[in-house]
Amino acid sequence: MCPQHFHEMSTANISDFPYHDLPESVEIDLNHYQQKYNWDCGLSCVLMVLPKEDREDFLSNFAGICKDEGFNKSTWTIDLCYLLKRYKIKHVYYTITFGIHPEHATNSFYDTILTKDESRINRRFDNAEKCGIKIKTASVTIEYILDQLRFGPVIVLTNTQLIICDRCKFNKMKTELRKLIPCVPKFQGHYIVLCGYSANLRKIFYRNPTMYNHVCVMSMEVFEHARKSSGTDEDIIFVKTLENQI
């Protein structure tokens, strides 16, 4: 079904790592897709996890599908779930807020889209179960995320202001600037696709749709900070490409 390939190394044996029975590292090969607009990072992440035929179908009918799904140029995590369901991709959506978090009304990132999207998003949440979309209202641990990466890629909503890639020059410059001018960055939602980890290095491997075709790397600590930032609702989609229990 999927274009992804999985690579596992020997079981982790470092004493301070909490999941001793996990492989030391996991890497999932994905076909990268670079976003074309400032609003399609989530859709680009979906494209990265779709099988080739579905990916080509989505790209060939992009505008029509966006219109048919009802999100046009404003996508929320629940929209990504409906899109995955459209292509019969098994997945589970975890979030700490069922529907729209009341605090989003005071978040500048959401103020231009909340009014037009609120009723649509709430309807999609309300109809999710009968549409066969599994939503679990819960916070997940980093250990659980690493465990699930053995079975498929993971789409995560992050605060892009807090993402620091160890490999990207731009991110290194951003880190140095923060040291010189410390401040609390505003929330800017951005989806990425997790595609592996290294337990020994305590690093997460991911694909960032704003970047050209390469795998980015960040520390687990940075990842935790970015995905749990206020505004994300800790939204995370586990895409199931191998059999397991989610």
Image: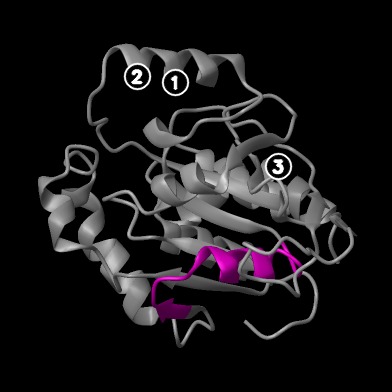
* Marks 2,3: beta carbons within 8 A: no
Instruction: Spot the residue most to the front.
Output: 15
Mark 1, Cα crowd under 10 Å, few <14 / some 14-19 / many 20+, is some
Inter-mark Cα distance, 3 to 1: 39 Å
The label nearer to you, 3 versus 1, is 1
Q: Is residue 12 visible?
A: yes
Inter-mark Cα distance, 2 to 3: 41 Å
Secondary element at image label 1: helix
* Residues drawn in magenta: 135-152
Query: x, y percentage for residue 119?
Result: 22, 64
Where's the C terminus, which quadrant?
bottom right
Q: At 40% from the left edge and 71% from the top edge, which residue is drawn?
A: 139
Where's the N terminus, which quadrant?
bottom right
Q: Which residue is more in the foreground, 142 or 39?
A: 142
Query: x, y percentage for residue 47?
Result: 67, 48
Q: Which mark is residue 175?
A: 1
Q: Which mark is residue 60?
A: 3
Q: At 29% from the left edge and 63% from the top edge, which residue is drawn?
A: 120
Query: x, y percentage for residue 77?
Result: 43, 58
Q: Is residue 148 magenta-colored?
A: yes
Inter-mark Cα distance, 1 to 2: 5 Å
Q: Tell me which colouring the rendered structure shows.
A: one colour
The label nearer to you, 2 versus 3, is 2
